[in-house]
Image: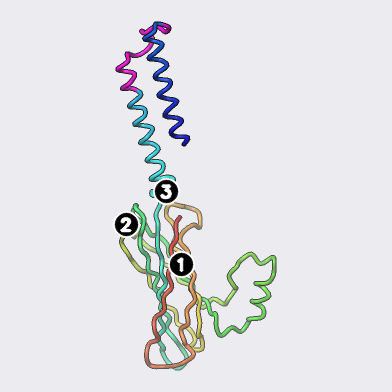
Amino acid sequence: MKYALTIVAILAFAYYITMNSMLGELPLDQYLTGTQIIESFATWIAIIIGGWWTYDRFVSERHIYPRLETTHDVSAVPLGPSKTLVRVMLRVQNTGRPVLKCDNVLIRLQQIAPCEHLEWIEEQLDDPSFENGEGPFPVLGERELRLDDMEIEPGEPDCFVADFIVSATVSCVSVYSHLANPRKVGREIGWNQHSVHRINGADYDTKPQPETESSGTAVA
């Protein structure tokens, strides 16, 4: 609505100048000719409309910023009576318009079950001063992948892999991943993904455990 009012105001101003010049109330030599006035204002209107379209398309809808969909694929393979290999695959797809540059990926594995400190974790979650909504479950491992100018084209998928060797008694894990946004230099802003997976590591078997999946979408 405000855009329409602005255009009407511009046209009214052009009409005012033209009419006053034609009636002799304003010296014509102080203004452009009628044809030049129409051409000039038509150009300005085109520029304004083009600017609004550009702003709405690329800034308001954030098409100039990268968009990413992330998915966790987690599989478990027994390595013996006491150890299990947990493989985390962070699958990503560039759903935005610009090329996505990846510099840093963090993947963290936490133990959910069995839980040896359940009462303490419950107390932390119930504490009003506890600012993190995620339970402080023990960390089994963390992998930080340093990438050398890796790029993902618009619409293209890719994946990052992190392996963890954990106790065979672990039956449920939480996976956290963070892919840094290169457009936010110096700030810890990017795409986060959380998921929980049963790996049945407590049941030793020579066969690989079935793969589980969790997906999500994120914009920065």
The residue under the point 65% across, 76% down is 122
Q: Identify which amino acid the numbered label 1 is placed on.
A: Leu
Q: Main secondary structure of the magenta part?
A: helix
The residue under the point 55% across, 80% down is 112
- Residue 42: x, y in percent? 33, 26
Residue occupied by mark 3:
61
Mark 1 or 2: in front is 2
- Quick check: is 27 in the magenta stretch? yes
Q: CA distance from mark 2 to mark 3?
A: 17 Å
- Quick check: is 140 in the magenta stretch? no
The part of the image, by quadrant, that contains residue 146 is bottom left
Query: Relative to residue 9, is residue 85 depicted above or below?
Result: below
Residue occupied by mark 1:
106
Q: CA distance from mark 1 to mark 2?
A: 22 Å
Query: Relative to residue 38, is residue 152 depicted above or below?
Result: below
Q: Identify which amino acid the numbered label 3 is placed on.
A: Glu
- Residue 185: x, y in percent? 46, 52
Q: Identify which amino acid the numbered label 2 is placed on.
A: Pro
The residue under the point 59% across, 83% down is 115
Boundaries of the magenta span: 25-40
The part of the image, by quadrant, that contains residue 30 is top left
Answer left or right for 3 relative to 131.
left
Q: Which mark is residue 154?
A: 2
Residues at circles 2 and 3 in contact by the CB criterion of under 8 Å:
no
The residue under the point 44% across, 66% down is 216
Q: Describe the element under mark 3 as helix, strand or loop.
A: loop
Which residue is more in the foreground, 41 or 1? 1
Q: Describe the element under mark 2 as helix, strand or loop.
A: loop
Return the disc, 3 or 1, that comes first in the chain's sequence: 3
Answer left or right for 169 relative to 19.
right
